[in-house]
Amino acid sequence: MEFYVKNIGEPNYKSDEMQIDTELEQLLTQISTLLFTRKGEVLGDPDFGANLEDYVYELRYNDYQLKTVIDYQLSEYVPLASKYNVDISIETVDDVSNHIVFLDITVDSRFQLGVYI
């Protein structure tokens, strides 16, 4: 069981839910939590979190490095990720004033989380 953590306005938000019961919903929630948590924010485990923004604004990072960090975090903190096929795709786009990262995580070729940083 996981607590229901979707916010008002998110796709498929349900105001009457307090917990998530299906494994797939739990997996997607755990991945989302992992991606948007900065290292040091979880009391008792300073290594939990992907620090996505640090990699986006860091000049010395590359896509492989970011994928490696996310893969490590998934293997350490999301046990359901080993039960399902979790695929990570990273695309970067640079324009005149921005460095943009598109992170797509696909679970079992059916469910996708998209992150735009």
Image (cartoon, grey):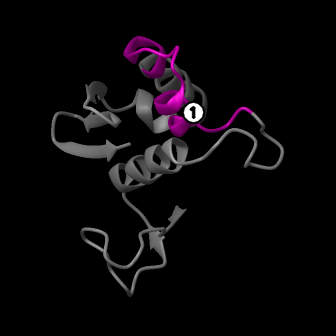
Q: Is residue 33 left or right of residue 8?
A: right
Question: What amino acid type should be assigned to the residue bearing mark 1?
Answer: Asp
Q: In which quarter of the image is residue 109?
A: top left
Q: Position of residue 23 (x, y in %)?
A: 39, 51
In the image, which residues are magenta? 47-66
For image coordinates 78% across by 39% down, the residue present is 45
Which is more toward the observer, 93 or 76? 93
From the top left corner, tell me how far across and down residue 56 is, in percent: 46, 31
Q: Position of residue 10 (x, y in %)?
A: 31, 70
Q: Name the residue under label 1.
A: 54
Q: Is residue 63 left or right of residue 44?
A: left
Q: Quadrant of residue 76?
A: top right
Residue plotted at (45% across, 49% down): 32
Q: Which of 107 and 97 is in front in this view?
A: 97
Q: Which of 97 and 1 is in front in this view?
A: 97
- Quarter of the rendering containing residue 87: top left
The residue positioned farthest toward the right in the image shown: 44
Q: Report crowding for label 1: few under 14, some 14 to 19, many 20 or more residues within 10 A (C-alpha).
A: few
Q: Determine the residue located farthest toward the left in the rendered image.
A: 110
In the rendered image, which quarter contains the C terminus? Answer: top left
How many dots with numbers?
Answer: 1
Above or below, 13 against 1 in this view is below
Q: Which residue appears farthest toward the bottom when viewing the image?
A: 16
Residue at point 54% right, 43% down? 34
Q: Does the magenta stretch include residue 67?
A: no
